[in-house]
Image (cartoon, grey):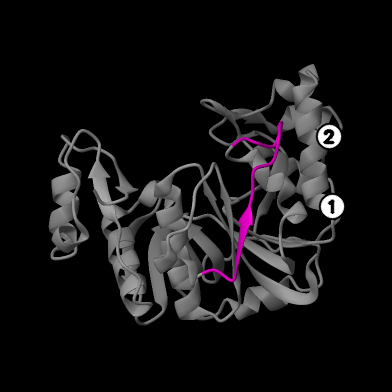
Amino acid sequence: MSDPASEGYILIAANKHHYLELAVSAACSLKYNDDRPIALMISGGLSVPKCYSGLFDHIVAFDPGPPYDGMFVRRFVLEKYSPFARCMHIDADCLLIGDKIDHFWSLFADRPFGVMANLKTTGKCYRDTLDIDEVVQAGLAPGVYITNWGVFYYQNTGDNIVLHKGRELLEMMLNDDDAFKASYFSRPGQLSDEPLWGIGLAQTEIEVPPHDYGALLQLTSPNTSDHKFDFAGRKFHARKGGIPKARGQIYHFAAMNPLDGYLEGIQFYREQLQVPLPSIHPKGGDLIDPSIWTNDVPGAVSQMMDGSHPTFEFALAD
């Protein structure tokens, strides 16, 4: 049962130690920049090492059953597990960098759901795999809200209207409704929740603030360039959407890109919170101890991204 007066952050670590390390770094950035509590939703038999447990005010087993056991659609049942009355979900590959997150807690305080998004009423979206005209013609919604859904606010009412709409749409899709299934965007091996959020939110009358590239809740890394991060100064900017210096509070390092900025950020926040850094396991390479890659972050990035080691994961040290 959630405390009616409580509010806090929700992080998810699912199935792999890599995602736990991402969540730990995100928690360090939250603790450095805010004093709201943090709940970690953990699944797949993961356990939190003692050196990390103090970062989290709640650690909650989060293993929903089908059809909500996928990596993305599980977020539609978050309110059944959230310990807070007012929640801000943040993807584990995000860092809170800015010092004005209170603005968004206040902005969304009287709404059941909060996100910055733009309503699109025609054309295609989500990598051109969702036909918005089909959605409108089928009478599902007047359009689709477009944003990155890695960060969103929700009231934990037990049956939140937007999460409820997402569950309804997922069940509709799984029941082979041809009109909707033809418009459904799927990631390899996983059902995607992005179209369901966008359609479900459009089915409500919730006021949605549009993207303001001078004051975003989150800025996400795809299609960005010219990044400048000042972690100690609590600010960042990047070129996005034709805006040379888009700014915000949370930077979403999708797939840890830009990698050099992400590694610099997690090194800064973990050092401030006196939390140890993880080891790195490059694909096809040997384990890299943090004492090596922290000596020269750009050099370490070059080493890991030179073609022989195109990807890596955070790993438990041997």
Q: Where is residue 157 in the image (x, y as percent from the top left)?
A: 84, 61
Tell me the magenta residue range.
56-70
Query: The disc labelled 2 sits on which kind of residue?
Result: Leu
> Relative to the observer, which residue lies in front, 252 or 141?
252
Residue drawn at x 12%, y 56% as measured from the top left: 299
Whether residue 272 sits left or right of residue 317 in the image: it is: right
Q: Mark 2 points at which residue?
A: 140
User: Which numbered circle lies on residue 287?
Assistant: none
Residue 285 lies, in percent from the top left, at 17, 38
Work out how far the residue at label 1 is from the one at label 2, CA to CA, in angstroms. 15 Å
Residue 75, horizontal then vertical, whole percent: 67, 47
Q: Position of residue 272 (x, y in %)?
A: 35, 79
- Residue 22 among magenta residues: no
* Residue corresponding to mark 1: 161
Res. 6 in view:
yes
Q: Is residue 141 above or below residue 303?
A: above
Left or right: residue 243 compared with residue 113: left
Sequence-first tag of 1 and 2: 2
